[in-house]
Amino acid sequence: MKNWPKALSTWLDDRFGLSAITQFLKEKPVPQHKHSIWLYTGSAILLFFVIQVVTGFMLILYYKPTLDAANASVARIMTEVPLGWIIRSVHSWSSTFMIAFVFIHLISIWLTKSYRKPREITWMSGVFLLACSLVFGFTGYLLPWDDLSLSATKVGTDIPRSIPVVGAWVTTLLRGGGDVTGDTLTRFFGIHVCILPIFIFLLLAIHVYLIQKKGMSIPLDAETRNEDVPTIPFWPNFVYREMVVWLVLVGILFSMAIVFPPSLDKQADLMAAAPEGVKPEWYFLFLFQTLKIFPAKILFVNGDTVAVLLMLMAGLFIFFLPVIDNKPTEWKGKIITALGYVLVVYVLIFSVWSPL
């Protein structure tokens, strides 16, 4: 039985066709150009998502999503469960890194116009992944059930109320009632650990399939001039380079998790007043600041309503960006590229500066 590894490999190959997959990866070309660095952001997202799943499974063994036990169970994870504090910290920081890289990945595609034909659906599935990532962060933020998370969730779930006709219904749906209560905690827990993973796994499968089907884009100027762009094989050359990036990112992740572990405040009190200076997580901060700069009334319409509708319109614009920017080399494409830079500057400024 000296050749049992080869026999096992042959047995698996006969049933799963692994050799065909390996051959496909060896033949798959990865373009190398001045924008190649952005190619590594996609796999970084997948890396942090896997870390989220693994650490999430560990946390769910001890977490109790009830009004009386949620905060205490998180405290127990941090103080009594072996290595529980680092697992929670890695879970929290990997969520931050994942969302940050989704933003970076999408804006890099926007500025390089990698969403152009025939990759429109790839972009749209990526926008859905961004939305799922943000909801992941939003629902997970409430689970420690402390004063800060309760107050921030009240603010966040109250924003949809400004949407005409359906706003109040959306807020009630999110909260499971008229206010944030234990029902909201249970609902957010179910969304966080059950509903969202199903959606994100499905979207990831579609997104990865489309990338394999349509391949990776080349710079717009090279495509316009019909230039040949040098390539390297996906396996093993590109994968080895990705592994170096993963190693660096994991090192940074664990360093941040050890040096800056997330805190835990006292158990939330539904009857207590909201603490001063409540703000959402950094990835929602620019939206929160945007709401603050709108006046109370704009032509007899609530300023919050105008702000939320503009945000929804901006979201639709971003989703349909490949359709709108269907001629990227013309003047319209240059304007949309400029809008991308403006968006980056706007988000950065309003994420670190409070206008009011």
Image (tube, grey):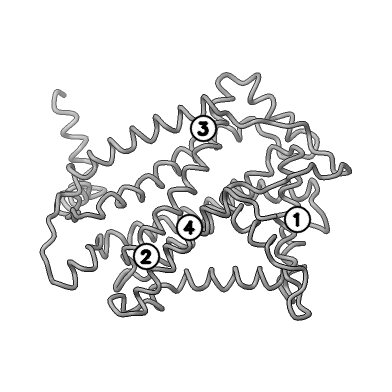
Q: Is residue 91 left or right of residue 322?
A: right
Q: Is residue 235 left or right of residue 324?
A: left
Measuring 52% from the left and 37% from the top, which residue is drawn there? 93
**Residue that label 2 marks:** 122
* Label 4: which secondary element: helix
Measuring 35% from the left and 75% from the top, which residue is drawn there? 333
Q: Which of pointers 4 and 1 lies earlier in the amino acid sequence?
A: 1
Q: CA distance from mark 1 to mark 2?
A: 32 Å
Q: Which of pointers 4 and 3 lies earlier in the amino acid sequence?
A: 3
**Residue that label 3 marks:** 90
The quarter of the picture where residue 247 lies is top left
Task: Give the answer, above or below, for where 119 lies relative to 23.
Answer: below
Q: Which of pointers 4 and 2 lies earlier in the amino acid sequence?
A: 2
Please tell me which residue lies in front, 327 or 11. Answer: 327
Q: CA distance from mark 4 to mark 3?
A: 29 Å
Please tell me which residue lies in front, 282 or 98. Answer: 282
**Residue that label 1 marks:** 175
Q: Which of pointers 1 and 2 lies earlier in the amino acid sequence?
A: 2
Picture coordinates of residue 107, whole percent (x, y): 41, 59
- Going by the numbered disc 3, the residue's amino acid type is Val
**Residue that label 4 marks:** 345
Q: Which quadrant is home to the C terminus?
A: bottom right
* Label 2: which secondary element: helix
Q: Which of pointers 1 and 3 lies earlier in the amino acid sequence?
A: 3
Badge 3 density bin: few <14, some 14–19, many ≥20, Cα 10 Å: many
Q: CA distance from mark 4 to mark 2?
A: 25 Å
Q: CA distance from mark 2 to mark 3?
A: 29 Å
- Going by the numbered disc 4, the residue's amino acid type is Val
Q: Which quadrant is home to the N terminus?
A: top left
- Going by the numbered disc 1, the residue's amino acid type is Arg
Q: CA distance from mark 4 to mark 1?
A: 33 Å
Badge 4 density bin: few <14, some 14–19, many ≥20, Cα 10 Å: few
